[in-house]
Image (spheres, grey):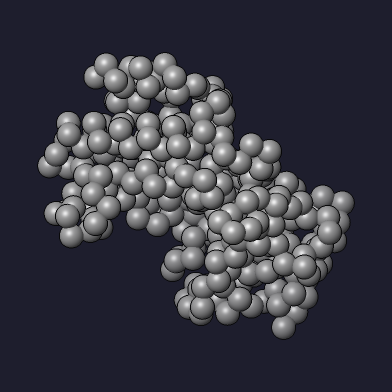
Amino acid sequence: MTTAEIRASGRIIQLRRADKELFPADGLTKADLAAHYRRVARRILPQLRGRPLMLERYPDGIDGPRIVQKDTPGHFPEWIHRSELPKAGGTIDYPVCDDLATLLYLVGQACVTPHRWLSRADRPDHPDLLVFDLDPSGEDFEPVRAAARALRGLLDELALPADLMTTGSRGLHVLVRLDRRAPFDEVRAFARDAADLLARRHPDLLTTEARKAARRGRLYLDVQRNGYGQTAVTPYAVRALPGAPVATPLGWDELDDPALTPRRWTAATLAERLLAPDPWRPAARSRSLGPARRRLEGL
């Protein structure tokens, strides 16, 4: 096994077992994964900075055991930022990725997918993101498109601009940027009430039933990620699935593209897309939930 040296953020990262195939069916190595994250650095780092992370690691490749890691081990370099946050019965020292050197070090730890908190470490109970996860019951993508259109329509009624992204897995995420005034309890209650209203408007298409047996083929509007300590996949992160699909930000006009699927872009095919302007620029201005809550109650 080879060791590669990578210069980033004024540091030299030792990428051990660089030729280890993390995606054996695709021949994608740890070095290839590092190249992807270096390629998307300008877009992914603003999505990561200041946020506690959950690391999805596969030391033996994606066909091997999955390790879900929240704490920062003692062997991590001192220069990697940490955030000690409370949990039931104690605290967890979460890793925080504020620069490219950290991101590449995490790749060296076989972290395929960094999942981020919806809040920042300085105000962990006050999210600056609200996420609706559009989770289909089957492989048909048309219900996901329909759900995204319906959700955007409701968010427009509530005067909440929203961003759209593929998850790289099964569905889409719709994200609303918040001003961090409301705590998680209020944000989650708002998301649940908005999802319930949308499901009542489209009872044959949508459901908020967490139990799969109760969904009866309908798309699940999942708002459970909107809670303290919960995470969502980071935009431009690779998923641990065959083909190495990438969670990819979209413009709303792309929702009608017949070629769109949740796994349309991969670590091997994303480069050309990066030549185009970022679909999330200019970023939607963060909003307060207060006015949106009053509008929701009026519907």
Apparent side of residue 249 relative to residue 209 in the rendered image (left or right): right
Q: Position of residue 264 (x, y in %)?
A: 40, 52
Residue 193 appears in view: yes
Residue at 29 percent across and 44 percent down: it is 221
Residue at 45 percent across and 37 percent down: it is 185
Reply above or below: 196 against 227: above
Apparent side of residue 235 relative to residue 163 in the rendered image (left or right): right
Q: Position of residue 38 (x, y in %)?
A: 68, 53
- Identify which residue, 41 or 155, lies in the foreground: 155
Residue at 51 percent across and 33 percent down: it is 183
Splitting the image into 4 quarters, where does residue 111 fall? Answer: bottom right
Apparent side of residue 219 relative to residue 98 in the rendered image (left or right): left
Residue at 56 percent across and 35 percent down: it is 126
- Identify which residue, 35 or 284, lies in the foreground: 284
Task: Assign the N terminus to one quadrant of the image.
Answer: bottom right
- Identify which residue, 186 or 149, lies in the foreground: 186
Extreme-front residue of the structure: 89
Q: Position of residue 222 (x, y in %)?
A: 34, 46
Residue 175 appears in view: no
Apparent side of residue 277 relative to residue 153 in the rendered image (left or right): right
Splitting the image into 4 quarters, where does residue 213 fall? Answer: bottom left
Reply above or below: 86 against 282: below
The number of numbered discs placed on residues in the rendered structure image is 0
Q: Position of residue 90 (x, y in %)?
A: 63, 58
Task: Assign the C terminus to one quadrant of the image.
Answer: top left
